Amino acid sequence: MEIPGKVSLYCPLVDAKGTTAMLVSVSDDGYYHLQVTVKGKVHTMFVPIAQAAVLFMEPEPEVEEGLEIER
């Protein structure tokens, strides 16, 4: 996964149910820093990690059997 990266946001706090966003960073203070397009304009949003889930739009690359990837 790459940051910044395109994600789907799930967060009941802001009534987001699969909202497309750009994950800009993850703060040490416990917030996702996101950019969300609302009515054609880009807005910055900070949502608490504890109350949100993000799903990266790009799937992880498939790993060949027997090949180990160091992370």
Image (cartoon, rainbow, N blue to C red):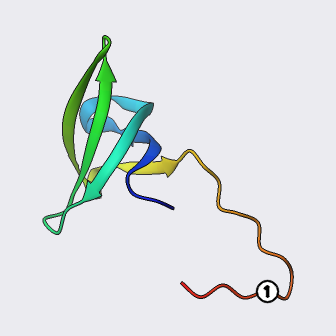
Q: Secondary structure at mark 1?
A: loop
Read off the residue under disc 1.
67
Say which residue appears at 17% left-offset and 69% top-offset: 28
In this view, the residue farthest toward the right is 65
Does 2 sit above or below residue 71?
above
Relative vertical location of residue 14 with respect to residue 64 in this rendering, above or below: above
Q: Nearer the viewer, residue 67 or 12?
A: 67
Q: Residue furthest top?
A: 39
Q: Image point 70% across, 63% down: which residue?
A: 61
Residue 40 rendering spot, x and y as whole percentages = 32, 13
Q: 10 Å neighbourhood of mark 1: few (<14), some, or many (≥20)? A: few
Figure quadrant of residue 63: bottom right
Q: Position of residue 37 (x, y in %)?
A: 32, 23
63 sits left or right of 17 in the view: right
In this rendered view, identify the residue nearer to me: 14 or 22.
22
Residue 42 image position (x, y, % from top left): 26, 25
Q: What residue is at 46 percent from the left and 43 percent from the top? A: 6
Tally the numbered discs: 1
* 42 to the left or right of 57: left
Indicate the amino acid at tag 1: Leu
- Left of 40 or right of it: where is 61? right
Q: Residue at x 19, y 62 (%)?
A: 27
Farthest left residue?
A: 29
